[in-house]
Image (cartoon, rainbow, N blue to C red):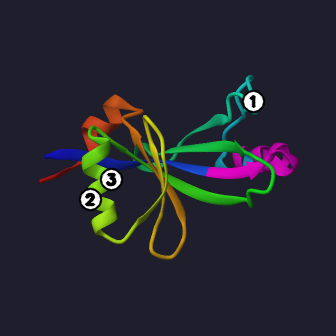
Amino acid sequence: MHRSRIGVVLVDHPSETYEAAADFWAAAHGSSRPEKHATAESPYEDLGHLSGAVELAMQRTGAGTPPRVHLDIETDDIEAELARVLALGATLAERHEEYAILHDPGGLVFCIVPVQSRAEFEAGATTWS
């Protein structure tokens, strides 16, 4: 048995469009950008939470990655969640020590990550048998 939930909506942009896009999405969300902006070494930037405790974040991606939106599924058991979504039709793109990058059946990128937000996870995760 394990638990999971969609915890983050990430807006991905390569360096050449990142700053303008981050300014736009922060303003569209009604938030402000943090003092420390995303860099190549630390590519994530938190823009606050959406309704229901789902985080909105920016991710600075590498050159050649098209702008896109992707979801992070946070879980207390990476291997069990990976098996669950693969059985549903996802395909594995990259497996890393602490997370996995996948594609849904239509090709949309998403990630499986360890629990990032303990209180929100405890309040909203689904239990899978």
Q: Position of residue 77 (x, y in %)?
A: 26, 40
Cα separation, mark 1 vs mark 3, equals 31 Å
Q: Which element type, helix, strand or loop, lies under badge 3?
A: helix
Asked if residue 22 is among those painted magenta in the image, a careful observer would answer: yes
Q: Split into 4 quadrants, where in the image is the C terminus?
A: bottom left
Q: Position of residue 112 (x, y in %)?
A: 41, 48
Asked if residue 91 is among those painted magenta in the image, a careful observer would answer: no
The residue singled out by tag 3 in the image is 82
Q: Are marks 2 and 3 in contact (CB under 8 Å)?
A: yes
Quarter of the rendering containing residue 120? top left
| Magenta stretch, main secondary structure class | helix
Of the numbered discs 2 and 1, the one sitting upstream in the chain is 1
Q: Start and end of the magenta stretch?
A: 11-26
Residue 82 visible = yes
Camera-side mark, 1 or 3 = 3
The residue singled out by tag 2 in the image is 84
Q: Which element type, helix, strand or loop, lies under badge 1?
A: loop
User: How many other residues sit within 10 Å of disc 2, few (<14), some (14-19) or many (≥20)?
Assistant: some
Cα separation, mark 2 vs mark 3, equals 5 Å
Q: Residue at x 32, y 30 (%)?
A: 119
The residue singled out by tag 1 in the image is 37
